[in-house]
């Protein structure tokens, strides 16, 4: 039974994919620190001071308060003040340094943490846009399209979560359709619903249907199938929705990505070092709470850090200070010994213009150099995250493909040293035809499917297309070529029956 | 006399600028190495093997060949084979680790090398373009415009050299107008003409007019007023034009930026490590030659490294492999102990679209993180360098302003730690009005003049402008506000008389 169910559950293993695609990017270059050991210690010490003197509010969750009281904290209403070092100790004693996130296709099963980077689509946009239409509310069709596109992009290792909000589905039911889309239209790992504890539970119940007996490991413990976003309400607050979702997920050994949501200057000080201390304090409090719920529950140190324009108050992206925060918080996560999440293809631009491109490129190159394990918001993000854009999705996926090649390190073998080529060619000649080039040209350099490197004349003859126009053709080509990974009919029917039952239990809520 | 001349020569010192503008960006974060010490040693050893076994051709320059023979090299025709370690030794025994490049405004006098980054406009385009007109041949008007724009952009510390080719001026005379434009319309440091030895000499003669007795230091030695581009004809070749210019400049103690021009796959192997060995060998040969000409002549380890599409043969930019080459060659320069030059806002795109933006951003952020002292091609570069673009110029200048903020390090003072803000605000509140924010908001975050961070509604109401359109308005605003730095009439007349005399000595050559 277990064997039958597990075969059925895994569904779409594809020998072709297994051979060629890695379920994560591997970093083979050293890590960088932009501040000194003494500076890190100052930030860590300040984080402990925040936890100890100011404290964190756990709102609307009496169970959480009681658990912190039992753990030795000082409680004042919903404010929890922690003995210095308690959160760090809970994390370091219990949380895994890295964890396996299983996918229904074992070749897609990934590992979050260590020297790996897992790239995840953007998350949470109510709107979509493309070159074909101005921004409008997203639908379930759009959601499915982005799941399919993520499945088709080799540089995206993960199907994500709320890749856009399917606003055409009632707000209390759409999580079922979203989770189903990830299960049905992709075989990459994905994220659970976190918008209410019962929606997290629905995700877990659907995972049990999809994986059958494989939901549990040989000791009867749940395996980890989801990595899900738990935002702190910065500054220094967790609300009952996020705490409720975290509890359901952690109890089921599902990973939580505890992420202070920071627009520096509004939710944190207008200062890089101060913001890093606050992020560390908030993230540690959330990750430590997960360890109280279930010691050993996988957690990720998450940050979403941007800044605001101190002139208008508007969020800004791709600017220098958040890049510095990225480098520092990535270092803090390494020192703490947990995986690190940040993003991504951030931008404030409303269109896929030079602004969108530089902002996203700045964030992605610094993110990848800083060392991110879970790159949320990798692809599609536009307009401060309000919009998921079709063209930007494939442009971002291309960009992260380049970034992971950079961190993939340098071939220092004899073939990489290429002295045979230099000897063969000699002064004043070219390398185009030499033996080394013949041997290596196919894989030597990253090849972008979206850039145009042709002459002005050829580019003109081909219609003077911009990258956005080429991207428009490209995502349509990907969707046209999409084939769903196989999912056996019995599992599919069981999932659909579960969804129908749950939908019938609830009146529609319009979000 | 000396005092009068020197006052006249320096011309446009401007107290306002002196107070607010730095003549270079300062790096206050550590350097990064993407390969190990052992890997560096392999590349350095291979470079010595190239110099020793394969050798470098010094073409059409008997003096150079004789000098290398005298220095102990093996000569075979124009091929020079070097005793292992000779070039490195010549450089390390003689070349300065950093040097002062004087400007006529002492507040603009910069230092090339060490923990400094000097940003220089793009160089060498025959064409210009803007949103107002499709690409066309550049003119002297365009040249003057870009000198003025570079003067107006605080993030550009340098006026550059051939910011575009003034194709309307005869090819053998235009260097005089170009050098004059740098002297007249800017007071930032600039580059000498290198397209023929006599044009380098003209530059030196004009510097003597501009600076008068200040051309020499207190020991009667020429000061360094120019940093100029000497390309190697990769692979492993220097031609007589470049050698001739190098000799004139080095004899006059002017700095030479010895730069292998590499499109990897054509001028170097299709491999990162192999390309780095070749670049090091070529650059060391050129820098060592400058030390033979004048021991102590300032030199810069230059690289221009891109790759070609192995499908079409077209040059590509902003791709991963050249970024790796950047990090490694920057490290090789630090180990050698000389300043390092690379670029810049490279892109293959024909328009200021997302492609242009990501390619330029990728190169600039990795360049700045890698540690570049002389960032040539910082601003304006389009279409593989064939085109200087007005909008891209100001977009790139903005981007490098952000990059230099990142490498400028993190404020770890008590104000940067901002614990007073975190204590004042507390959980669930915002930081907008707290005392720390009031004290810091003006300078806390980089403010781009070109990005739009407003709401979709406001952006729509303002005409749905792209970054390219905003950049179009911005460079016009800069040009409209431009005021030339003062240059005394006597010096100006002497420069113009020199130019007239030289032009009259030559028939027109059409390039």
Image: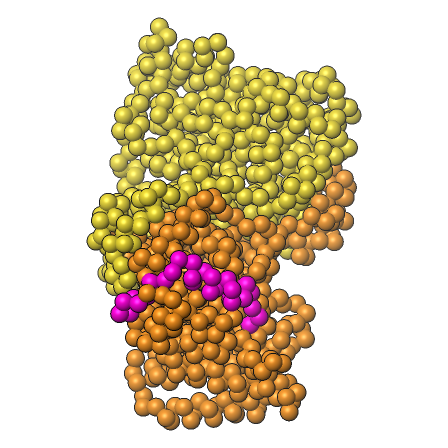
Chain colours: A orange, B yellow
Estimate the x, y position of residue A439 in percent, counting from the top left: 74, 53
Estimate the x, y position of residue B461 in percent, counting from the top left: 23, 60
Q: Which one is nearer the viewer's eye here, A192 or A237?
A: A237
On screen, residue A108 versus residue B157, left or right, reads: right
Q: Residue at x 77, y 41 (%)?
A: A424
On screen, residue A97 versus residue B353, left or right, reads: right
Quadrant including the C terminus of chain A:
bottom left
Q: Is residue A52 magenta?
A: no
Q: Which one is nearer the viewer's eye here, A428 or A305?
A: A305
Estimate the x, y position of residue B212 in percent, counting from the top left: 40, 12
Residue B453 visible (yes or no): no
Query: In which image quadrant can residue B70 be found?
Result: top right
In this figure, what is the number of numbered marks?
Answer: 0
Q: Is residue A407 above or below residue B181?
A: below
Q: Is residue B42 above or below residue A365?
A: above
Query: In which image quadrant can residue A22 be found?
Result: bottom right
Q: Residue at x 38, y 35 (%)?
A: B150
Stretch in magenta: A75-101
On screen, residue B139 versus residue A312, left or right, reads: right
Residue lying furthest top: B1
Estimate the x, y position of residue B468 in percent, counting from the top left: 36, 51
Q: Is residue A97 magenta?
A: yes
Quadrant including the N terminus of chain A:
bottom right
Q: Residue at x 51, y 83 (%)?
A: A207
Q: Residue at x 47, y 93 (%)?
A: A497
Residue A111 visible (yes or no): yes
């Amino acid at each position: 039974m277990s064997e039958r169910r597990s075969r059925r559950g895994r569904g779409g293993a594809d020998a072709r994919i297994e051979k060629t695609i890695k379920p994560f990017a591997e970093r083979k270059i050293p890590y960088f620190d932009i501040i000194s050991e003494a500076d890190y210690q100052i930030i860590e010490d300040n984080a402990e001071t925040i936890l100890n003197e100011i404290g964190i509010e756990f709102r609307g969750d009496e169970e959480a308060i009681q658990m912190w009281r039992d753990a030795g904290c000082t409680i004042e209403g919903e404010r929890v003040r922690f003995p210095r070092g308690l959160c760090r100790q809970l994390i370091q004693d219990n949380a895994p340094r890295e964890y396996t996130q299983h996918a229904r296709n074992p070749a897609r099963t990934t590992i979050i943490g260590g020297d790996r980077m897992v790239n995840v689509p953007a998350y949470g946009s109510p709107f979509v846009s493309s070159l074909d239409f101005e921004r409008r509310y997203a639908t379930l069709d759009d959601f499915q399209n982005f799941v399919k596109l993520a499945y088709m992009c080799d540089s995206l290792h993960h199907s994500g979560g709320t890749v856009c909000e399917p606003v055409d589905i009632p707000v209390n039911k759409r999580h079922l359709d979203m989770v189903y889309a990830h299960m049905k239209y992709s075989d990459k790992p994905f994220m659970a619903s976190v918008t209410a504890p019962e929606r997290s539970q629905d995700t877990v119940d659907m995972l049990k249907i999809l994986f059958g007996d494989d939901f549990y490991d040989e000791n009867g413990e749940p395996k980890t199938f989801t990595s899900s976003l738990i935002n702190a309400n910065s500054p220094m607050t967790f609300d009952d929705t996020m705490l409720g979702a975290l509890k359901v997920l952690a109890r089921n050994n599902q990973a939580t990505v505890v992420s202070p949501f920071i627009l520096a200057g509004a939710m944190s000080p207008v200062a890089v070092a101060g913001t890093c201390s606050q992020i560390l304090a908030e993230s540690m409090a959330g990750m430590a709470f997960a360890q109280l719920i279930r010691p050993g529950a996988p957690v990720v140190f998450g940050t979403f850090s941007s800044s605001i324009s101190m002139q208008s108050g508007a969020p800004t992206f791709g600017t220098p200070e958040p890049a510095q925060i990225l480098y520092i918080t990535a270092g803090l996560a390494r020192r703490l010994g947990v995986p690190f999440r940040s993003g991504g293809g951030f931008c404030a631009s409303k269109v896929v213009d030079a602004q969108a491109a530089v902002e996203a490129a700045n964030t992605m190159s610094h993110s990848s150099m800083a060392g991110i394990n879970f790159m949320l918001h990798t692809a599609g993000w536009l307009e401060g995250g309000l919009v998921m854009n079709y063209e930007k999705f494939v442009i971002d996926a291309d960009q992260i493909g380049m970034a992971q090649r950079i961190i993939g390190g340098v071939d220092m073998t004899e073939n990489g040293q290429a002295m045979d080529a230099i000897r063969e060619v000699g002064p004043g000649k070219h390398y185009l035809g030499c033996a080394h080039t013949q041997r290596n040209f196919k894989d030597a350099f990253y090849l972008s499917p979206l850039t145009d490197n042709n002459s002005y004349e050829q580019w003109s003859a081909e219609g003077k297309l911009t990258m956005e126009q080429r991207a428009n053709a490209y995502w349509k080509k990907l969707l046209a070529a999409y084939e769903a990974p196989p999912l056996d009919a019995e599992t599919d029917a069981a999932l659909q029956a579960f969804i129908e039952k749950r939908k019938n239990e609830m009146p529609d809520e319009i979000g």
